[in-house]
Amino acid sequence: MEPVLFYGVPEGCSFGAIVALEWSGLPYRLCRVEMPGVVSSDAYRRINPVGETPTLLTEDGRLLSQSMAIFHHIAARSSDASLRPAPGTPAFDRMNESLAFLNTGFFGAFAPLWYAFEHESADKQALVDMGTAKVRKAHANLDTLLGDQPWLGGEQRSLADAYFPGIARWNDFHKVVDRREFPNVQRLHDKLQEDPAVRFAHAIEEQQPARSAGGFAGHVGLEEALERAAVTGRS
Ligand SMILES: N[C@@H](CCC(=O)N[C@@H](CS)C(=O)NCC(=O)O)C(=O)O
């Protein structure tokens, strides 16, 4: 059975896992999960008890969540060696350094802005000010981390580059900084927008015709995915 990726819309960080699956060349299916409604439903919590996307139903029927775990699972099975530099090499270390920064500092910088957007709060302006400062700092840090390297992991495209565009777009959603102030980040962003897998992920989210260069075998509905998972508890 092909793995099934549960991806969240709108604006889900699961975007990166779609890109990674495309790059991997592996066969896979997708299950669309609307946020915040379906993602917090009892049905979806049988897939992911904390009500978050992404989750991957692996080919052997296990449920795996957390982007980092999903990325490494995909890479380990891919025939594309560039997705899995050997442990201990500089490329492996640099990829993990970038992934960790994206998944913590860069991702987390947007938290006050998401909270202000999703909740009525007397402190809305304070949250926006805090989020703006954090997003600015995160962009400056990423610009430094990237430097003049072609990719986040150095010379070779890696999982970190798959993850980046799905998070970076939150800056556009919340209209925070002018990305051109961070030329290395802007360069990477623009390059990735031209990538066929990134275009594919955008088209999937927007429910437009999407051409897979990899192994996309179609969508499954949540009910069918639940049956496939035959959830009896997470193994
Ligand atoms: N640490 C998790 C974070 C996952 C996460 O926060 N997912 C968000 C979308 S980016 C989500 O599903 N939120 C549920 C909601 O908005 O209700 C990961 O790296 O996968």
Image (cartoon, grey):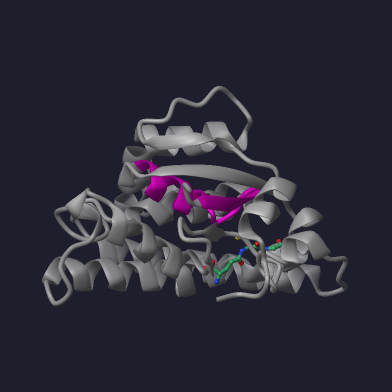
Q: Is residue 165 above or below residue 98?
A: above
Q: Locate residue 65, reporting x and y percent.
A: 54, 68
Marker count (numbered): 0
90 to 153, vertically: above or below: below
- Vertical relation: 67 (above or below) 168: below
Residue at 37%, 57% (x, y): give it: 74
Verify whether residue 19 appears in magenta.
yes
Task: Report the quarter where the C terminus lies.
Answer: bottom right
Highlighted range, magenta: 4-22
Where is residue 37? Give x, y as percent. 81, 55
Of residues 43 and 87, which is closer to you in this image?
43
Question: In this rendering, would 203 be left or right of 146?
Answer: right
Q: Is residue 12 left or right of residue 3?
A: right
Which residue is depicted at the point 51% across and 69% down? 66
Q: Nearer the viewer, residue 77 or 170?
A: 77
Direction from residue 170 to residue 117 in the image, left or right: right
**Residue 83 picture location, percent across and down:** 25, 55
Q: Residue at x 36, y 36 (%)?
A: 214
Residue extending furthest top? 209
**Which sits in the foreground, 120 or 63?**
63
Residue 152: name its quadrant: bottom left
- Observer able to see residue 89: yes
Write down which quadrant ligand 1 falls in. bottom right
Which residue is the extreme one toward the left?
Answer: 89
Percent x, y of residue 226 = 69, 55
Q: Quadrant of residue 68?
A: bottom left
Say left or right for 176 vs 117: left
Assess whether residue 93 is covered by the magenta stretch.
Answer: no
Q: Is residue 180 visible?
A: no
Please report the residue visible at 62 percent of the width from the left and 53 percent of the height from the top. Answer: 228
